[in-house]
Amino acid sequence: MRHTWILAPIIWALLTGPASATGLQVAPLAGAEKADIAAYYKNGSRLLKALKYRDTDGSSRIVAIGANPNGEKFDARDDKSYTSMHAYGFVEDHGGQLSRWEIKEYHDMLCAVKVLTPLFDVIDAGDGQPLTMVPYWIPCDGLDATRVKLIMIYKDRKYAIRGQIPNQEEDEETREPGENFRELPAAVRKTALAYWAKVMAAAKKDGS
């Protein structure tokens, strides 16, 4: 009995403590749930990726990203090029889904939205909390620098890192965290900046 008494708190801590990347149970959305979320994308737009995960408070969460196809702009064969992007975050509520946040990006005929779909993800923020990553880049006709954005959701609040990839020799590569980025815990900022490096590398590869 003494051994059981010692082990019980340890087991309880493992079950209820902060979620690791594995503890978040991130998985692709499927079946009827995916069909319900896909219904948010209509009038020509389409769902690109949807994920389900378990938040540290025990709630079931869904994140999704979709876009409007680009048509004849740039290259009609390029299925990563869109006129707009729309991402949602949902929490399960009495059998349905309650929207907690959304992100929209629109562009005119001179620009496109390129969604980095493989890097749209929910990861461990570095402190056991989930961190949703919404990465994309925006090329435009001409010699203007290519803009890159990483919008992050941490505890249902939005944070961002923005930068650019130069298209002319006199331009510089930049990285500019948003004004509220400094409010994040140090471990989360470290995680975000490491992910930004992946986003920049992916945008450069896509644009090459």
Image (cartoon, rainbow, N blue to C red):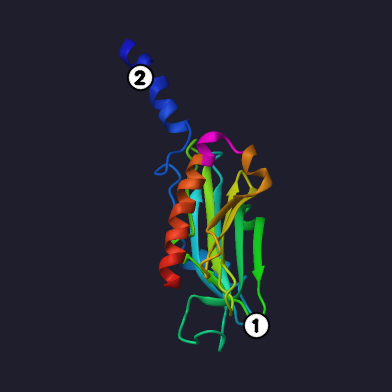
> Is residue 199 at least partly visible in the picture?
yes
Note whether residue 95 is visible: no
Residue 112 image position (x, y, % from top left): 58, 76
* Figure check: 37 above or below 83: above
Residue at the disc numbered 2: 7
Res. 128 mark: none
Residue situated in front as seen by the camera: 133 or 160: 160
Examine the structure image and report whether residue 99 is included in the region drawn in magenta: no
Counting other residues with Cα less than 10 Å from the Cα at mark 2, is it few (<14), some (14-19), or many (20 or more)?
Answer: few
Residue at the location (52% across, 45% down)? 130
Residue 190 locus on image (x, y percent):
49, 40
Q: Tell me if residue 63 comes above or below residue 86 in the rendering.
A: above
Among the two numbered marks 1 and 2 on one chain, the one whose residue lies closer to the N terminus = 2
Question: Which residue is at a point 65% across and 67% down the rendered structure image?
Answer: 105
The segment highlighted magenta reads 184-189
Q: Amino acid at mark 2?
A: Leu
Element on which disc 1 rests: loop
Eye-nearest disc, 1 or 2: 1
Residue 153: % across, % down: 59, 50
Contact check, label 1 and label 2, Cβ < 8 Å: no
- Identify the residue shown where x is 49% and y is 52%: 196
Instruction: State the residue position of label 1.
Output: 109
For the residues labelled 1 and 2, the Cα–Cα distance comes to: 63 Å
